């Protein structure tokens, strides 16, 4: 999870932007800055350029076709816009956010953004990193869409205050909204993230991390929560733990053992919609 409020939306609203990086470390200069390259609407799964002088570029269509290949059709329908932003090679690879009107008003559709510079590094086959990144991003949409969350964004200025005033034992909340009682995220939190763990989590949001301290914070989490996280990036937040665990659920053929990590991966198997999505993605990828 990352916050890009000032960079992308003029600082009007504090946004939850779920960013998925090729590496968990922010660049030494601080939070990742993504520069817009292109922006398309998505209508019935097709890319539409809103500027008649700038048709859809073939190289962007090629990336979009990869996405359509990996995502089941019913989930493509959640995507209302597709962006290409770059911070150069490495750094941020992709993120999702709620789709918005130019004035920042949130829509019920989602915006998916890919860094084309990282696509060059990745051959985008079923064995490569790209389908995993896409699956990770998809899980954010699965967890945070309006059937799961009541949209109730927290403004930039309130960001530091809200966490201490929210009773996490009553249900999960993030800067984006409030998890519905039976939502995937609420169930995930009930099972794996007790309130004191959320409130005392040693790793701050990515934009507040001191890169020099990240290694020791990760070591601290590993010591306190052994065999609990499927990846280092999963330690960043509840949302990233959910997304990384879901990605493992899709890509691992069979999960052995009873560690917390294994329980997190198996968690998704209780939901028909997620079981179906896993089967569809695996079928497309030939796994
Ligand atoms: Zn993520």
Image (tube, rainbow, N blue to C red):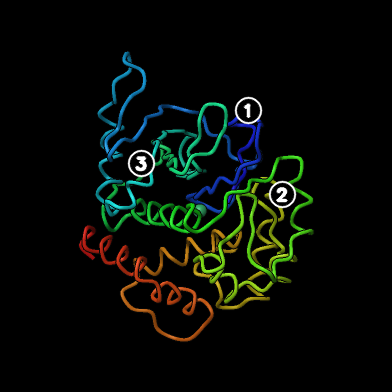
Mark 2 CB near ligand 1 (8 Å cut) = no
Disc 3 element = helix
The tag earlier along the polypeptide, 1 or 2, is 1
**Which label was assigned to residue 142?**
none
Q: Residues within 10 Å of mark 2 (few under 14, many from 20)?
A: some
Q: Position of 278 compared to 194: left or right?
A: left
Front-lying residue, 270 or 138: 270
Which residue is labeled 1 in the image?
10
On screen, residue 26 above or below 58: below
| Res 93 visible | no
The tag earlier along the polypeptide, 1 or 3, is 1
Q: Secondary structure at mark 1?
A: loop
Residue 245 appears in view: yes
Q: Residue furthest bottom?
A: 258
Q: Which residue is mark 3?
A: 119
Dot 1 alpha-carbon crowd within 10 angstroms: few under 14, some 14 to 19, many 20 or more = few
Q: Residue at x 36, y 31 (%)?
A: 41
Q: Tell me which corner region of the image, top left, top right, bottom left or bottom right, holds residue 7.
A: top right
Image label count: 3
Give the percent coordinates (x, y) of residue 111: 44, 40
Is residue 271 or residue 280 the one in the foreground?
A: 271
Is residue 285 rendered to the left or right of residue 130? left
Task: Locate residue 145, reporting x and y percent.
Answer: 47, 52
Q: Earlier in the sequence, mark 3 or mark 2?
A: 3
Query: Label 3 vs label 2: CA separation?
Result: 28 Å
Q: Residue at x 27, y 45 (%)?
A: 66
Q: Position of residue 252 (x, y in %)?
A: 35, 71
Pointer 2 residue: 210
Q: Residue at x 41, y 28 (%)?
A: 39
């Amino acid at each position: 999870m990352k916050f890009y409020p000032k960079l992308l939306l003029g600082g009007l609203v504090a946004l939850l932007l779920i960013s998925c990086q090729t590496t968990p470390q922010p660049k030494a200069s601080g939070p990742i800055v993504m520069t817009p390259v292109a922006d398309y609407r998505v209508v019935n799964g097709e890319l539409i350029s809103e500027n008649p002088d700038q048709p859809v570029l073939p190289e962007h269509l090629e990336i979009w076709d990869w996405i359509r290949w990996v995502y089941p059709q019913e989930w493509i329908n959640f995507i209302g816009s597709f962006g290409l932003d770059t911070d150069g090679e490495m750094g941020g690879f992709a993120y999702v956010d709620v789709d918005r009107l130019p004035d920042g008003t949130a829509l019920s559709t989602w915006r998916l953004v890919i860094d084309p510079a990282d696509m060059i590094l990745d051959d985008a086959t079923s064995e490569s990193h790209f389908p995993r990144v896409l699956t990770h991003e998809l899980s954010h949409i699965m967890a945070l869409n309006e059937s799961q969350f009541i949209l109730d964004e927290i403004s930039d200025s309130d960001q530091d205050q809200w966490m201490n005033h929210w009773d996490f034992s009553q249900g999960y909340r993030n800067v984006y909204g409030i998890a519905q009682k039976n939502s995937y995220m609420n169930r995930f939190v009930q099972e794996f993230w007790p309130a004191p763990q959320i409130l005392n989590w040693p790793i701050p949001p990515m934009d507040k991390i001191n890169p020099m301290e990240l290694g020791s914070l990760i070591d601290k989490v590993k010591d306190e929560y052994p065999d609990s996280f499927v990846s280092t990036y999963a330690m960043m937040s509840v949302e990233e733990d959910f997304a990384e665990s879901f990605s493992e659920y899709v890509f691992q053929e069979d999960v052995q053992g009873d560690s917390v990590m294994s329980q997190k991966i198996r968690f998704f198997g209780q939901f028909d919609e997620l079981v179906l999505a896993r089967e569809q993605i695996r079928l497309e990828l030939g796994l």
